[in-house]
Amino acid sequence: MTFRNPSPLLLGGAVVVGILLLTKGAKAALAPTPYMPGDSNAADVEALARMLIVETGLNMSTEEMAQIAFVAINRARRYNTSIPEVVIPPGRPNWNGSSTYARLFEAADSKPVWEKAKAFARRVLAGEFQNKGYRNFVHPEHMAGPPCFGRPVLASTKYGLRCVPPEVAQGTQISKTLFG
């Protein structure tokens, strides 16, 4: 069966359906997506678990820890690299270049929460939590107060005014952590 002269109604309907599909596709492309379970491996789990122990002690809110893990995942995606490349000190781009972070990162597997941290990392990588798309975070309670010098800017946090990187200054605070 062939259509020689399709009706204007049929053509209009096809155009509307096409626009809806394109619009839905564009929105999906802009929205943060979960890390796909098939994309992760044992190195990803171990790197996230170590980083979570150092950054959170595994004693922050579940949502806060998940979003910290997603910062590493989102940076890996953005820079087309692996999760371990992002969080193993000093990280790429620089995650945390301090010698204290490096020492704690290396010793993380000796902590009593090691197995719990790996289990939590697996849950994040399996898509159990919503990735809100953050690529930066700070713990404002450890940031200096005013006056700010150099690159940091002043931000109001639950810990009062703090000098924070501009990437998180207008961000979202989840429990103890400021995300941007």
Image (cartoon, rainbow, N blue to C red):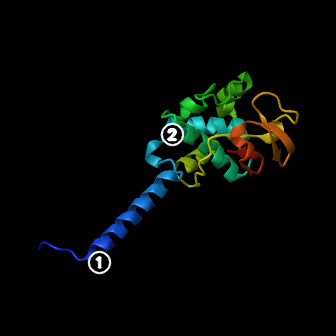
Q: Residue flagged by tag 1: what amino acid is it?
A: Leu
Which residue corresponds to the image point at 49% horizontal and 33% vertical from the top-left? Answer: 81
Residue 87 appearing in the image: yes
Q: Residue 9 carries which label?
A: 1
Q: What secondary structure is found at the residue carrying circle 1?
A: helix
Q: Nearer the viewer, mark 2 or mark 1?
A: 1
Mark 1 surroundings within 10 Å by alpha-carbon count, few (fewer than 14), some (14 through 19), many (20 or more): few
Q: Residue flagged by tag 2: what amino acid is it?
A: Arg
Whether residue 35 is situated above or below residue 76 in the rendered picture: below
Q: What secondary structure is found at the residue carrying circle 2?
A: helix
Which residue corresponds to the image point at 56% horizontal and 55% vertical from the top-left? Answer: 128
Q: In which quadrant will I find the C terminus? A: top right
Relative to residue 133, is residue 61 drawn left or right? right
The front one of 107 and 62 is 62
- Point out the tag, 2 or 1, that comes first from the N-terminus: 1
User: Mark 2 = which residue?
Assistant: 77
The spot of residue 170 in percent (x, y) is: 73, 47
Relative to residue 173, is residue 6 drawn left or right? left
Which residue corresponds to the image point at 88% horizontal and 35% vertical from the top-left? Answer: 146
Whether residue 20 is situated above or below residue 166 in the rendered picture: below
Q: How far apart are marks 2 and 1 (CA)?
A: 44 Å
The front one of 151 and 44 is 151
The front one of 94 and 45 is 94
The spot of residue 70 in percent (x, y) is: 59, 45
The spot of residue 73 in percent (x, y) is: 56, 41
The spot of residue 33 in percent (x, y) is: 51, 51
Relative to residue 26, is residue 59 drawn left or right? right
Residue 112 appearing in the image: no
Q: Which mark is residue 85?
A: none
